[in-house]
Amino acid sequence: MKKNRLAAGAFALAVSIMACGCGDQVYELTDEEEAVIVHYSAHVVTKFNKKQSEGVQDLSVLKAQMALKEEERKKEEEQLKEEEKEEEKKDEENKNNGNKQQTAADEQESNKPQVNYVSLSKALQLGDMNAVYKKYEKSPIYAESSSFMIRANEGNELLVLHVNLKNTGNKAAECDILSKMPSFRLTVNGDVSVSADTSILLNDLGTYQGEIKAGETVKTVLIFQVKKGTVKKIKSMDLEVSVKDSSSIVQLIAGR
């Protein structure tokens, strides 16, 4: 009831103010305009009515709310900083673990027995003859000529190494590798290991015999059999050469 009286008073005051002034004609309000003014006036009055839920706003409550929000903001910032510290800690631990693993790998690598590689010429004890590995090929059949050929056993394929023999001396010389009775074992990619086939090929490196003129080069081969699919891509090849009581390791790199 009191609220209605206050609203009516506010409305009357607004109307009287608009009616005053220099003899101007009184402005007549429409029903909609009256409703707007009454609603606004009632809202203004109730804002300062302590007994209304929309009454005077308590500053202490506002301050408490602001303090609570500030406290929540600080907590969120602290939590974010803690999470960042945890992430940095994890990154540091991962970095240290990576360094430890790398160190362990380096130590393991350093503990491996070092291989002393020699040239193919030295391994075969050729003197003035120079043996140089040139290339490899994989094939089911290798043919030196129409009369001499080798076919891979069932389920295998041939791995053929091409080696050039060159007389680096000033005169013709006999090259007799057969008399040395060498044996060859090839390790591919560190895990596939096979022995060379003994063949009747005239250009078989292990059984080669013949005179080579000064500066002349003879092409020879070493033939190995590997299971199909075990050697798809060759990354490294080590050739173990045994002559009598001597054994050497040759790292096969094209042109060496």
Image (tube, grey):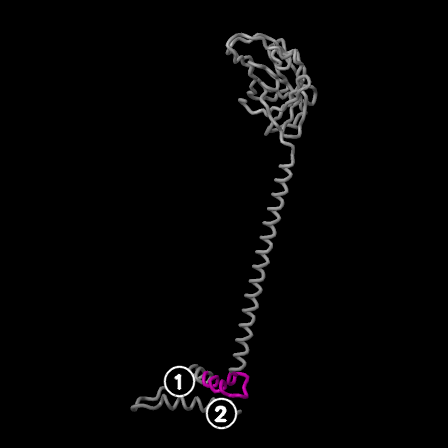
Relative image position of residue 212 (x, y in whole percent): 55, 9
Magenta region, residue range:
40-58
Q: Earlier in the sequence, mark 2 or mark 1?
A: 2
Residue sitting nearer the eye, 116 or 190: 116
Residue sitting nearer the eye, 158 or 8: 158
Relative image position of residue 4 (x, y in whole percent): 50, 90
Residue sitting nearer the eye, 33 or 211: 211
Residue found 52% across the figure and 92% down from its top: 2
Q: Which residue is mark 2?
A: 5
How would you rate the neighbour count of disc 2 (Cα within 10 Å): few for under 14, some for 14-19, many for 20 or more? few
Residue 151 picture quarter: top right
**Mark-to-mark CA distance, 2 and 1:** 20 Å
The residue type indicated by label 2 comes to: Arg
Return the mark for residue 154. Answer: none
Relative image position of residue 214 (x, y in whole percent): 51, 9
Relative image position of residue 185 (x, y in whole percent): 66, 22
Q: Secondary structure at mark 2?
A: helix
Instruction: State left or right for residue 35 relative to residue 210.
Output: left
The residue type indicated by label 1 comes to: Leu
Is the residue 233 above or below the residue 28 in the image?
A: above
Q: Which residue is mark 1?
A: 29
Is the residue 186 above or below the residue 98 in the image?
A: above
The number of discs equals 2
